[in-house]
Image (cartoon, rainbow, N blue to C red):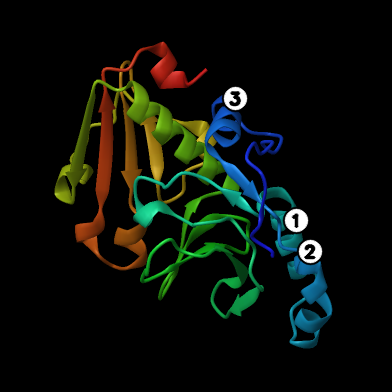
Amino acid sequence: MDDQRVSPLPVAPAGLSRRAQRFIETEGIRLRRQDIRRYRDVWIEHGVPAAEIERATSFQDRWGGLVLPPAPFYEGGPRILNAGCPEEESAEGWSFRAGDCRVSMAYSFVIGPDGAFGIAADVWTPLHASTEGWVESLALAADARRWATTVTRITRKSVDALDLGEFEPVPEVVGVTDSWWRGKDSLIAVYRGEAVGLDAPQCLEAHIYGGLDEWGLQGG
């Protein structure tokens, strides 16, 4: 079966922070990776460009079959990272699904034309500039929850009122619509994806992790 477990201890792909590597290797599970190369001829017959098939295949080779703990927003994120058949959206170009949702959702998780990780409903909304950024954000959230002495959830106008003047963006998450901010003893995660992608301002949300020491802020 394609989703048969083959290793409870996955090896993290190269190029991630030590925090994200540790997160994958201690909290992730690697299932048997689906071989999407077998669909190549069929996809080409249906008009999928070879370059887009290669892009999906590269994603599958790097991330396919990886199961990570639920994200703190987006109803947990993809259940298993797996590439789907590339599809052309007239306005944005070619994209492909990044994995099935854990629950019924109004959108799907997609890798966009430029490699960004995001959500697609009526419009395409990039969350992070890469899948690496999405995984880095999951690892950061896991560390922040573990080490913070306080966690505060705020929504709607309170998010826009946040004073981030003394904070700096966390570069490894390569945020686009979503972002992480690091202060002297706190981290702030801002989730704008649903608010933008669904035109639903009530979905705007931020999580503030307070009371962090150097380890909690940097994660190693």
The three-letter code of the residue at mark 2 reads Glu
Q: Residue at x 52, y 36 (%)?
A: 27
Give the residue at mark 2: 54
Q: Quadrant of residue 167?
A: top left
First in sequence, mark 1 or 3: give its number. 3
Mark 2 burial class by Cα count in 10 Å: few <14, some 14-19, many 20+: few
Which residue extends farthest top?
214
Which of the numbered marks, if any, corresponds to residue 74? none
Q: Return the residue nearer the eye: 107 or 5.
A: 5
Give the residue at mark 1: 58
Give the residue at mark 3: 18
- Residue 182: tell me if it is visible: no
Q: Residue at x 70, y 55 (%)?
A: 32
Q: Return the residue nearer the eye: 180 or 209.
A: 209
**Disc 1 vs disc 2: Cβ atoms closer than 8 Å?**
yes
Tell me how far mark 1 sits from mark 3, CA to CA: 22 Å
Tell me how far mark 3 sits from mark 2, CA to CA: 28 Å
Name the quadrant of the N terminus. Answer: bottom right
Mark 1, secondary structure of its residue: helix
x and y percentages locating residue 73 in the rendered image? 34, 50
Q: Residue at x 32, y 43 (%)?
A: 190
The three-letter code of the residue at mark 3 reads Arg
Decide: is 60 above or below 148: below
Mark 3 burial class by Cα count in 10 Å: few <14, some 14-19, many 20+: some
Mark 1 burial class by Cα count in 10 Å: few <14, some 14-19, many 20+: few
x and y percentages locating residue 202 in the rendered image? 19, 59
Mark 2, secondary structure of its residue: helix
